[in-house]
Amino acid sequence: MFTYLNPDVRQRLISDGKLVRINATGGRISPEQASPDGEIAINVLGPIPLPIKLGELEIQARWYATVRSTELAKVEELASELSRHGGQRLFSMLASSMAVNSVLAIGNGERSSNPLVRVHSSCLTGDVFGSQRCECGPQFVSALDRISKDEHGGLMIYMSGHEGRGIGLWAKAATYLLQDAGEDTYEANRSLGLPDDSRDFSDAAALLHYFVRGQPFRLLTNNPKKIADLGAFGLKDITPVRHVTGVNPWNTRYLAAKRDWGHALSETDLGLDKS
């Protein structure tokens, strides 16, 4: 957090071109300029060299950490108040409440004319714990692998505020118990009075505008709604690329529910084709 809070360090990062601010269409705006109410402004910090090793996968990436200016301003204001009262020990609480999204640029990702892109929703249970109740962990690793091997390179956009299709980790845990009692993943959301999918892709769209620069791109997804949501924010020339991996006996019912909801998954993909 001190990178953001210390004015001298912040100014040095701006001068070095390592901290920029973009608007909803990916255009650069002044880091000092306050964004009008209701308009998106995102701080982008990087690139940061990031060697990655996940199992057998070893790649080199460039990491960009991103956060909305409105969230950052609130945290900075509270942090200043804590500093005045000697409450630095509470800084970790401030940081934990701020959704910091990430972009991993691989190969020629930021300069490619047709990059391979994955917009990946955070999943602690799948990405970190290795849970087989979903396919998120294998999708994440497979996407990095496919992007690293692609001649055009590409981008992994990791959305930290998307846990459980946007309902958060606590509610997601409750839906797991409801699923164990017989409901599917969407029915469980509704039982809690929550939407089927409450993810907001506006930040992902702004980052794609900034990094892709109006070029066509290929999107690793089986979800037509994700393409429609990104398209609603002005992104065009999106080519869907099927991304089926991580299917196992634990998540077949979960994936079947996603298929019934509209995901491009077949009986063969799910191992249900007995012919």
Image (spheres, rainbow, N blue to C red):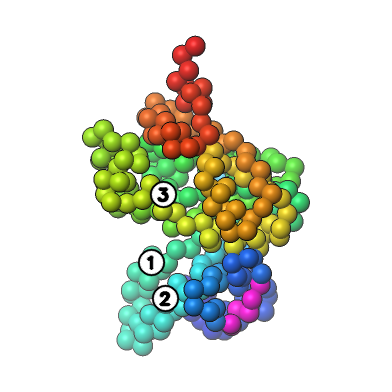
- Distance in Å between CA atoms under marks 2 and 1: 9 Å
Residue that carries the numbered disc 1 in the rendered image: 97
Kindly tell me whether residue 132 is visible in this rendering.
Answer: no
Residue pictured at 46% horizontal, 78% vertical: 73
Pointer 3 with pointer 2, Cβ within 8 A:
no
Q: Position of residue 261 (x, y in %)?
A: 43, 38
Which badge, 2 or 1, is on the more N-terminal residue? Answer: 2
- The image shows residue 124 at horizontal and vertical percentages of 40, 48
Circle 2/circle 1 CB separation < 8 Å: yes
Count residues near mark 1 (Cα–Cα under 10 Å), then give few for <14, some for 14-19, many for 20+: few
**Decide: marks 1, 3 in contact (CB < 8 A)?**
no
At a point 44% along the width and 54% down the height, the residue shown is 199
Name the residue furthest left.
181
Say if 115 sits above or below 77 in the image: above
Q: Which residue is mark 2?
A: 75
Circle nearer the N terminus (3, 2): 2
At numbered mark 3, what does the secondary structure look like: helix, strand or loop? loop
Q: Which residues are magenta?
A: 28-33
Q: Residue 88's image quarter?
A: bottom left
Q: Is residue 274 left or right of residue 215?
A: left
Magenta stretch holds residue 257: no
* Residue 228 image position (x, y, % from top left): 56, 49
Residue 143's disc is none
Amino acid on which the number 2 mark rests in the picture: Val
Task: Considering the whole magenta stretch, tell me its main secondary structure.
Answer: loop
Residue 104, quarter of the rendered image? bottom right
Residue annotated with mark 3: 197
Q: Closer to us: mark 3 or mark 2?
A: 3
Q: Identify whether 246 is placed above or below 217.
A: above
